[in-house]
Structure formats: structure tokens, C-alpha cells
Amino acid sequence: MINLILAWLVVRIFYPPAPGCMLPSPPGPVHDAARFRLSKISLAIIFALIGLRVLSGFTGWEPLPLMVIALAAAAPLLVLSPGRRELIRKADWCTLVFFAAMFVLMQSVFDSGFFQASLDVTRVTSVPVIMTVSVVISQFISNVPFVALFQPLIIQQGMSVQEMLALAAGSTIAGNLTILGAASNVIVVQNAERQGITLSFLEFFRIGLPLTILNVVVYSVFLTFF
């Protein structure tokens, strides 16, 4: 919650409200009632299955794989919707291929031993160090591939709960620093450019740098002392 408030403050400082700046008009009435109902069913399924997965952590059950949750939520639209062919055709296949190829590449890098040889994991043990390493290295290989490469290594060193949370937090806020810090940033910028809106690397970085520093401080203090 503290970091959410800080994010709002930083953006507010760099981009104060402009006179006459209006939000886009809300969407119009629903035209496809059948697809609307199926979408509500899909949302209900994904929330229910995520709740079941969280509950399994307290009961000792085998958790549902995330892949199963995603496919189950998509099933009503992909199986029952009359416009399922249109939905499949409009999927962002370039982005899906990008992610698939990225994970294949990162697994290849991990199997080669290159990442393990270039980073001394035994020194990456404290919460602030894990946070810093997560933020910095994610700028070069993106945050999700970094976690895929780094997590197995620090698990072998006997990772604590605080260290696991530091990895999760650091790799997440890595996307606040630069566009390259998270693959989701690249997707957003790419879609914005399709609409004629350009967001430069430096424009992103001048806001991302102070925000990321504040995020690292807040998370480091919280995970170290609380």
C-alpha cells in the first residue's frame, strides 16, 4: 500500500493535472449479450479456481497448476461463444510467440551454465542485495526470465521466506525502472505505438528511477525488520 501511494505521488509530481484534461468516455452499452454472459462465467471460474489454489496452500492439497486455471477460464469463450474463431484470430499471437521463445531461450541459458558461472549466488543472501540484483539484472534479460534463472540457484542455497519475497518484490519493481525491465512494459509500449502514442526510454526512466529507489527502500525495510 505504501508503494502504491508513492507511485501515485511520483506520477503526480512529474505529470500534474492539466487544465481540461478529461478521461475517455466510458464504453457504450453491451451489444453482444451472449459473449458478455460467457465473459462473466470466465471471470467467475478464474476467481474461484485461484481461491481454491490459495486455499490448497493452507490444507496441504496439491495446488491446481496455473495452466489449468487459465485454460478452464478461457474454455467458456473458446468452446461456447459463436464468435470463438474471431477471438482466436484476434489474439496477440506475436506476443505469445515472444513469451514462448523467451522461456525456451532462458532454459537454454540455464542449462548451459553461463548464468551460474557469471554470478556468485553465495553472496546474494541478504534482502537488500537480492532486491538490488533483481532490479539490475532484470534490465538486461527482463524480470520473468531473471526469476526463471535465479530462483533455482538461491533455492539450492536454502532460501528463506523473506528472501523469496525479496526476489518476488525486486523482480516486480524492476519493471518500474526502465521499459526493458519487464516484458509487460514492452507489450504496453508496442500497443501504444499502434495507437500513435510514443513513450521514449528516457521519458520512462526519469520517472522510473526515483520511483524504483523508493520501492527498494520500502520493501527492504519491511522485509528486513517486519
Image (tube, helix red, strand yellow):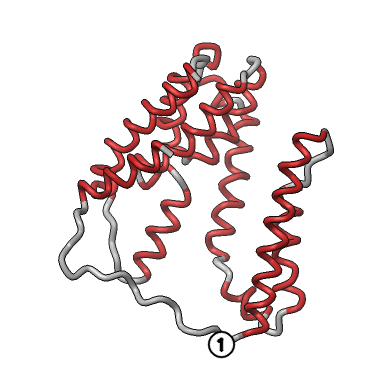
Q: Residue at 54% across / 19% down in the picture?
A: 117
Q: Residue at 45% across / 26% down in the picture?
A: 131
**Label 1 neighbour load within 10 Å: few <14, some 14-19, many 20+:** few
Quarter location, residue 194? bottom left
What residue sits right under mark 1 in the picture?
31
Q: Residue at 28% across / 62% down in the picture?
A: 198
Q: Eyeballing the image, is 98 above or below 177?
A: below
Q: Eyeballing the image, is 3 above or below 25?
A: above
Foreground residue among 214 and 98: 214
Quarter holding the N terminus is: top left
Q: Residue at 81% across / 35% down in the picture?
A: 59
Q: Is residue 3 left or right of residue 16?
A: right
Foreground residue among 207 and 13: 13
Taking the view exactly as shown, the residue that stands out farthest to the bottom is 31
Q: Is residue 96 left or right of residue 224?
A: right
Taking the view exactly as shown, the residue that stands out farthest to the top is 123
Q: Amino acid at mark 1?
A: His
Quarter location, residue 91? bottom right
In the rendering, at what x and y percent does residue 87 appear?
A: 62, 76
In the rendering, at what x and y percent does residue 178 appear?
A: 34, 43
Foreground residue among 137 and 166: 166
Q: Judging from the image, what secondary structure is the residue with disc 1 in?
A: loop
Quarter location, residue 36? bottom right
